[in-house]
Image (cartoon, rainbow, N blue to C red):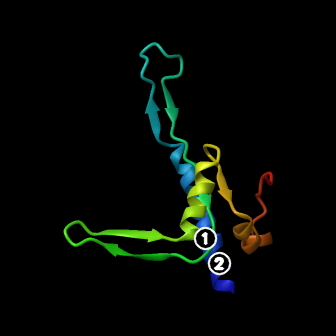
Amino acid sequence: DDGVQDAAIRALAMAKDMVIEATNVRIPHPESGAQIPFETLQIRVGIHVGDVTCGVLGQRLPKFTTCGTAVNMAARMEQTSQPGRIRVTKDFHDLVGSAETGWFEKE
């Protein structure tokens, strides 16, 4: 379905923007005599495609939450990614296909 592929491409574009923008956040070095006065924030992103369940939980302090196998898989992708990188599953890669040309190595 083109709508699903379009949503996946937009999610990937947002992830790329997040990784780039994170490097604009400066983190001061704790040592006052450090040669590098600051470091930049680096985030890891994991993306998967699949069914999720979502909704608002709680009445006093409502929180929007998502759960499901796809959420767990995306979390695993993020946890095993390198800082400053986006790690995607094969399902996501196959869905986006040739619409994205900037893929790095395949594990």
Name which quarter of the figure residue 92 lies in.
bottom right
Q: Is residue 60 left or right of residue 39?
A: left
**Marks 2/1: CA distance?**
6 Å
Q: Residue at x 63, y 48 (%)?
A: 80
Q: Residue at x 64, y 81 (%)?
A: 4
Extreme-front residue of the structure: 69
User: Badge 1 local density, few (<14 within 10 Å), some, or many (20+)?
Assistant: few
Q: Position of residue 89 (x, y in %)?
A: 70, 63
Q: Which label belongs to residue 10?
A: 1
Name which quarter of the figure residue 56 lies in.
bottom left
Q: Amino acid at mark 2?
A: Asp
Q: Position of residue 35 (x, y in %)?
A: 53, 16
Extreme-bottom residue of the structure: 1
Q: Are marks 2 and 1 in contact (CB under 8 Å)?
A: yes
**Residue closest to the eye, 35 or 96:** 96
Q: Which label belongs to residue 6?
A: 2
Give the secondary structure at mark 2: helix
Q: Position of residue 54 (x, y in %)?
A: 43, 76
